[in-house]
Image: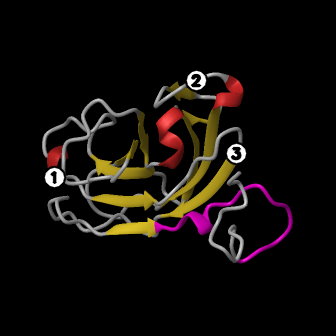
Amino acid sequence: MIRRLSQLALALVLTGCAENAVLEVELTLPAQPATGAPLFAYVQARSADVVSFDEAWAGTDAIDGRALETAVSMLPFSVVAGGASFTRQLGVRIRFCASRDCTGLGDDRAPEVRYRIQRAFYQGHRTRVALVIDAVPAPPPPIGAPITDIDKCDVEGCTTGTTSTYCFMNGHHFCED
């Protein structure tokens, strides 16, 4: 489930309460560019054994596009997973489109930012990640766009206080049983 906090809920994979896991995402969006048509940030998330960005993501859950503001803004949302999704990678794709749902003329070539999280979910736990987009990327075709990989040890969760990593020295995440 992707959820814009208290505004939108969509199901990625949803199971019983203790049977799921939640990733809280704090997405920092760039300001609307000074020139050009207004843009919307269209966010999709997809869980897979190996996330591929160069294939169609039709049918994935998404947050309706949010208009970029004149200043940097925050878009918090949640992704809920269950079952096999716990150990899979999570891909997050943010497209910058002319239309709210990314189906307008030219939106098939919209610039995008891609994140691939090695492991985001741990059964019965909440984790957190902050994603920051400094500027709308140049508009080349999205095939071959760079991917920012996020290691499981950079996904916050299952500890309090300040730490430089969320994994033990043996490489296991604090949330792993």
Location of mark 1 (residue): 109
Residue 75 on image: x %, y %:
56, 48
Q: CA distance from mark 2 to mark 1?
A: 35 Å
The amino acid pointed to by label 1 is Arg
Location of mark 2 (residue): 15
Q: In this rendering, is residue 84 above or below 28?
A: above
Q: Is residue 155 magenta?
A: yes
Q: CA distance from mark 1 to mark 3?
A: 34 Å
Q: CA distance from mark 3 to mark 2?
A: 15 Å
Mark 2 falls on what kind of element?
loop
Q: In this rendering, is residue 71 above or below 38?
A: below
Residue 56 appears in which quarter of the rendering?
top left
Residue 72's tag is none
Is 46 or 169 nearer to us in this picture?
169
Range shown magenta: 150-164
Rendered residue at 57%/42% (across/down): 77
The amino acid pointed to by label 3 is Arg
Horizontal side of 67 relative to 56 (left or right) equals: right
The amino acid pointed to by label 2 is Thr
Residue 33 appears in which quarter of the rendering?
bottom left
For the residues bearing labels 3 and 2, Cβ distance under 8 angstroms = no
Location of mark 3 (residue): 126
